[in-house]
């Protein structure tokens, strides 16, 4: 039956064509690999700079040095000075009297005559100096009383806490005024245990 044979051949050819079309989706029968997404890598953060003390040392300003108001040798010029010290030598760390009195001191402040050493009491009033006059304030670390008359010490049986020193010129003569203060608190308007013991006066010799 020629007709039936031709139909079978046509059907076989059509079926073979479908197989080829299906195989053509992948060349050589291999599967197409999936595309890989591009890497989205963020740049590394910048390095945080580290301070190196060795490469750049920090320089700190030195604290200001308190200067002495007056240094030298002076003779007693009022009764308090004569009994408490006699002639006086003022040095950087010591104040020494001719009668054996000695004060080991440290500078604590430079103030003005208008400042108060306790509530309502000014340096200017008791030392008889100008309000703008500079006053050197020294803390007494150690005190030795006069050799022959210990009771003549600036503050008697009390320890001298501070000495306030001012320098006034009288022509070419230096006048040195030393105010002795009892109490261990820092002399100021707020001080509660500070009081004046005595005010001694000294003079230099002319042209010395």
Image (cartoon, rainbow, N blue to C red):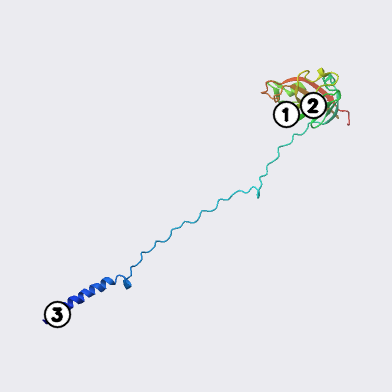
Q: Residue at x 20, y 75 (%)?
A: 14
**Label 1–label 2 contact, CB within 8 A:** no
Mark 1 or 2, nearer chain start: 2
Q: Residue at x 80, y 25 (%)?
A: 177
**Residue 148: image location, x then y, percent:** 86, 19
**Residue 4: image location, x then y, percent:** 12, 79
**Label 3–label 1 contact, CB within 8 A:** no
Can the viewer see residue 89 in this picture? yes
Residue that label 2 marks: 103
Q: Residues within 10 Å of mark 3 (few under 14, many from 20)?
A: few
Can the viewer see residue 170 in this picture? no
Residue toward you, 101 or 125: 101
Mark 3 or 1, nearer chain start: 3
Query: Dividing the image into 4 quarters, which one contains the N terminus?
Result: bottom left
**Residue 73: image location, x then y, percent:** 85, 29
Using residue 15 as the reference point, say whether residue 163 is left or right of it. right
Give the structural element (helix, strand or loop) at label 3.
Answer: helix
Spatial CA span between label 3 and label 2: 143 Å
Report the disc number at residue 134.
Answer: none
Report the disc number at residue 5.
Answer: 3
Using residue 101 as the reference point, say whether residue 31 is left or right of it. left
- Labels 3, 2: front one: 3
Spatial CA span between label 1 and label 2: 20 Å
Residue toward you, 163 or 34: 34
User: Which quadrant of the view contains residue 41?
Assistant: bottom left
Report the disc number at residue 111.
Answer: 1
Give the structural element (helix, strand or loop) at label 1.
Answer: strand
Q: Residues within 10 Å of mark 2 (few under 14, many from 20)?
A: many
């Amino acid at each position: 039956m020629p007709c039936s044979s031709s139909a079978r051949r046509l059907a076989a050819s059509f079926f073979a064509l479908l197989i080829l079309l299906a195989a053509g989706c992948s060349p050589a029968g291999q599967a197409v690999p999936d595309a890989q997404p591009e890497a989205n890598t963020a740049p590394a953060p910048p390095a945080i700079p580290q301070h190196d003390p060795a490469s750049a040392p920090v320089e700190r300003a030195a604290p200001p040095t308190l200067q002495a108001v007056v240094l030298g040798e002076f003779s007693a010029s009022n009764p308090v000075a004569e009994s408490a010290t006699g002639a006086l030598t003022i040095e950087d760390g010591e104040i020494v009297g001719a009668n054996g009195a000695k004060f080991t001191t440290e500078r604590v402040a430079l103030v003005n005559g208008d400042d108060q050493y306790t509530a309502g009491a000014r340096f200017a009033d008791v030392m008889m100096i100008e309000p703008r006059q500079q006053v050197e304030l020294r803390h007494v670390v150690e005190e030795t009383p006069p050799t022959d008359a210990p009771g003549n010490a600036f503050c008697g049986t009390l320890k001298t806490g501070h000495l306030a020193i001012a320098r006034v010129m009288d022509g070419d003569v230096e006048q040195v005024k030393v105010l002795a203060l009892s109490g261990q608190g820092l002399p100021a308007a707020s001080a509660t245990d500070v009081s004046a013991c005595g005010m001694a006066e000294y003079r230099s010799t002319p042209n010395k």
